[in-house]
Amino acid sequence: MKPQTIPEKELKNIIEDLEEADSISPQAYESIIANFDVYPFDDYQKMYYTIGYNGEYDELLEKIYDLEYYPPKDSAWWLDLANEGGDVCWYATRVSNAFGFSLKSLLPIDPTNRTTTKFNEVMKRVHRSKSKLTESIKKFFRDGKGEMTPEWEARLRISLSSFFIELQNLGLFYEISLSDMMRFNVLKLGRRKLENKLHGDGDKR
């Protein structure tokens, strides 16, 4: 998958529209974020994205554990959490696309559905789904030799869908929808692209 290029004027219009909107469709999200991909090596993209969503997931957990042990003094935590969730969405979406899946085929049908409302169970389920997804991708290369068969397509589809379902449930525990994560992700990355700051470290670029 080669990175796409979006004209600066069009990107500015997208950002302005999303600043006023309260949601973004999965189809629009995956189409827009393809323009923010700076990874150059096609042969290793699937592994790069896999490493990426694992790393961003860990950063999301750090934010969540901080909330549990150090109650926030203002509402800034909500946006921080939505942004971290958005980073997870970016890598999870890109690895889904790299394997040939669209978000429409993977995301929960009901964007408000919760698999559980108990915190410990929420964390257990999302962590388990992330681990199973990573394991499926590892075995795709190890046992499947990286060749997509109907069996591997079904397994990867289930693993990816399960991860998005549990990520949605985790977000809803904090009143953050997947659409919130995706919208703020486009806003953050779109502004960075306009400022030529997609490369680098840290959230405050």
Image: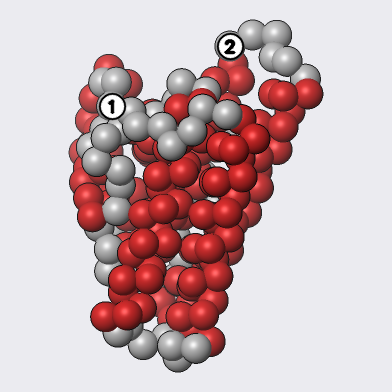
Which mark identifies residue 75?
A: 2
Q: Residues within 10 Å of mark 2 (few under 14, many from 20)?
A: few
Question: Along the horizontal axis of the image, is 178 left or right of 125?
Answer: left
Query: Quick one: quadrant of the N terminus?
Result: bottom left
User: Is 67 displayed left or right of 159 in the figure?
Assistant: right
Left or right: 119 with respect to 147?
right
Q: Which residue is farthest right?
A: 69
Q: Which mark is residue 32?
A: none
Task: Identify the element where label 1 is drawn.
Answer: loop
What residue is shown at x 23% (from left), y 55% (from top)? 105
Q: Quadrant of residue 76?
A: top right
* Residue 21 appears in the picture as rendered: yes
Q: Earlier in the sequence, mark 2 or mark 1?
A: 1
Mark 1 Cα-neighbour bin, 10 Å: few <14, some 14–19, many ≥20: some
Amino acid on which disc 2 is placed: Ser
Residue 68, position as x, y percentages in the image: 72, 24
Which residue shows up at 40% across the image and 44% down it?
165
Q: Which residue is mark 1?
A: 23
Give percent across and percent down for residue 24.
26, 33
Please state the horizontal and vertical placement of residue 203, each as a whole percent of the image. Answer: 60, 37
